[in-house]
Amino acid sequence: MGCVPGTNSRDILELLTFHGVGRKVFFLILHDVLGDRRSGIVSDVHVAKGAVALGWVKETDVEKPDQIAKELEEWLDPIYFFDVNLTLAGLRQLWYEDDLQIRCRNRQTIQTFAARLQITSLVQKVIEA
């Protein structure tokens, strides 16, 4: 776990004893509230599906996002932990937006940028997972 100025790791770990606080919420708090974005990956079903689709992990059960996050953390440089969630989850959440008008605009934008960056097949794997 990274170092958060003005706190100690024992106090931070106490968060995990609170009802409803698991790995995902714990790392969300570290990332968004305390600014520690290198401690671990915030993983949910979106991150799990993206990581599995890209072949980044051995675990294929997307209902095990914590296991998938731990696998990613084994080989991924911690400077990218925050970006993994932001990219994989963010992309999928934009693609599957509930509001039809916003969803259509999001999809058009994603497809345009993917084509310009020549990563259409990569993006397609992540969003279709």
Image: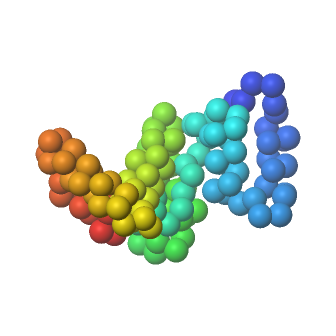
Residue 2 visible here: no
Say which quarter of the image contains residue 92. Answer: bottom left
Whether 117 is drawn above or below 91: the answer is: above
Q: Quadrant of the C terminus?
A: bottom left
Q: What residue appears at the point 14 percent right and 42 percent down from the top-left corner?
A: 116
Q: Position of residue 85 (x, y in %)?
A: 48, 50
Say which quarter of the image contains residue 98. Answer: bottom left
Q: Position of residue 42 (x, y in %)?
A: 57, 52
Q: What residue appears at the point 84 percent right and 49 percent down from the top-left corner?
A: 14
Q: What residue appears at the point 43 percent right and 52 percent down from the top-left corner?
A: 90
Whether 128 is drawn above or below 1: the answer is: below
**Drawn side of residue 94 relative to residue 44, left or right:** left
Whether 64 is drawn above or below 44: the answer is: below
Q: Position of residue 5 (x, y in %)?
A: 75, 24
Q: Position of residue 7 (x, y in %)?
A: 81, 31
**Drawn side of residue 16 relative to residue 31, left or right:** right
Depth check, front residue: 111 or 85: 111
Q: Quadrant of the N terminus?
A: top right
